[in-house]
């Protein structure tokens, strides 16, 4: 493991330990952290969990079960998690918030489809005495806590990886930037971080904000970029996540590229990892979901019990509507073919067998992945 990977691994471990140890600390009554007032609650809690969509594999495969498991551990199996997925529909998610309020959940974890659209629902829940934990995306409105990754750092790491892959070609051609959905506040942060690294070092020929993060929309945008710029001019593609990278790479293959230009990604989806093994995608951002999920669970249980977040939150962030939100930000890892074994396999996200299916066995063998 190289020095950078060791530093990241240490940071991730420290974040996970801080979250885990927080549960063992003594709880204090909250003054201004948004905790509910009144008599302290026991472990028989009802925690609402609203996730934004099911096109990205992470939410159903990782986030939901990890959060449910941690809440169960924290409450001796006595808490109940009420779950709903908005399937990328902001209006549906607002209705789901209303249902959670009607059901009188003790705390609500929300990963917003649309950070602005959810603000009214957040306020309504707050007025009903339900503390809100913004998960992965910083929802607007009076949220009580937030956990995610350093999203500008995600963009910076993606941009640095793309520059590394381009080398001397950085100035000889143009790149295409495929950003995420404008309704997702994280997408703006990824873009900001990427531009902070790329501006002045590469020429951006075309840049798109991709509606709903959909691979098919990224595919159509990439086809348009190839038509507008010409395939001989495109030397690299900044893709904000793996799903879009898949659509982009399909368009590049159809566009007649003799050799695929480097393409970035995010989320370390299995298909993305396999494209990295095959040499079709240069990198992805691996987010250790366990520390993020643990932080959300610990915040939700603490706030539901009327306890302070002092022993859990490691920083504070501001949203457009709320200042000084107690937060936990988890470090990320730049995933390339060189560190698959030391990241997603070591952490148990995937096994080598899951990655190295017959289609990818030769490519896995070539990089020593077994």
Image: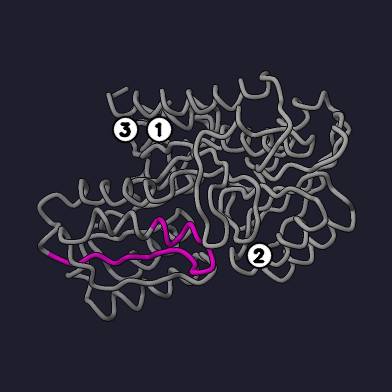
Could you tell me which secondary element the residue under label 3 belongs to? Answer: loop
Q: Which residues are magenta?
A: 173-190
Position above or below: 30 against 285: above
| Sooner in the amino-acid sequence: mark 2 or mark 1 | 2
Answer yes or no: is residue 109 visible: yes
Could you tell me which secondary element the residue under label 2 belongs to? Answer: helix
Q: Residue 302's quadrant in the figure?
A: top right
Task: From the viewer's perspective, tell me whether residue 81 is left or right of residue 266.
Answer: right
Point out residue 359 in the picture as x, y percentages from the top left corner.
45, 43
Q: Residue 88's quadrant in the figure?
A: bottom right
**Magenta stretch encompasses residue 366:** no
**Magenta stretch encompasses residue 183:** yes
Position above or below: 135 against 214: above
Which residue is under mark 1? 340
Could you tell me which secondary element the residue under label 1 belongs to? Answer: loop
Q: Which mark is residue 119?
A: 2
Q: Are marks 3 and 2 in contact (CB under 8 Å)?
A: no
Look at 86% across and 33% down and name the residue there.
41
Which residue is under mark 3? 338
365 or 168, which lies in front?
168
């Amino acid at each position: 493991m190289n020095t950078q990977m060791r530093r990241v691994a240490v940071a991730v471990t420290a974040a996970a330990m801080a979250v885990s140890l927080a549960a063992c600390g003594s709880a204090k009554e909250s003054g201004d952290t948004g905790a509910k007032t009144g008599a302290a609650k026991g472990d028989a809690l009802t925690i609402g969990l609203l996730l934004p969509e099911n096109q990205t594999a992470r939410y159903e495969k990782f986030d939901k079960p990890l959060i449910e498991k941690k809440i169960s551990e924290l409450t001796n199996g006595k808490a109940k998690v009420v779950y709903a997925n908005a399937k990328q529909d902001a209006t549906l998610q607002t209705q789901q918030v209303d249902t959670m309020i009607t059901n009188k959940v003790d705390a609500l974890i929300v990963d917003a489809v649309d950070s602005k659209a959810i603000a009214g629902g957040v306020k309504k829940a707050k007025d009903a005495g339900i503390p809100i934990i913004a998960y992965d995306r910083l929802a607007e409105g009076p949220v009580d806590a937030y956990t995610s990754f350093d999203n500008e750092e995600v963009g910076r790491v993606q941009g640095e990886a793309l520059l590394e892959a381009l080398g001397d070609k950085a100035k000889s051609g143009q790149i295409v930037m495929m950003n995420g959905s404008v309704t997702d506040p994280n997408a703006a942060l990824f873009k900001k971080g990427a531009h902070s690294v790329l501006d002045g070092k590469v020429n951006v020929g075309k840049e798109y904000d991709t509606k709903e993060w959909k691979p098919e929309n990224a595919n159509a945008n990439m086809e348009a970029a190839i038509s507008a710029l010409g395939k001989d001019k495109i030397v690299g593609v900044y893709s904000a996540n793996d799903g879009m990278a898949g659509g982009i790479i399909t368009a590049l293959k159809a566009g007649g590229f003799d050799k695929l230009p480097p393409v970035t990604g995010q989320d370390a989806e299995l298909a993305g990892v396999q494209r990295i093994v095959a040499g079709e995608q240069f990198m992805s951002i691996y987010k250790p979901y366990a520390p993020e999920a643990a932080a959300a669970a610990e915040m939700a249980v603490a706030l539901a019990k009327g306890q302070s977040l002092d022993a859990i939150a490691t920083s504070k962030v501001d949203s457009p509507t709320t200042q000084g939100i107690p937060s936990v930000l988890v470090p990320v890892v730049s995933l390339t073919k060189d560190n698959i074994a030391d990241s997603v396999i070591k952490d148990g996200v995937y096994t080598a067998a899951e990655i190295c299916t017959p289609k990818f066995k030769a490519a896995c063998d070539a990089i020593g992945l077994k």
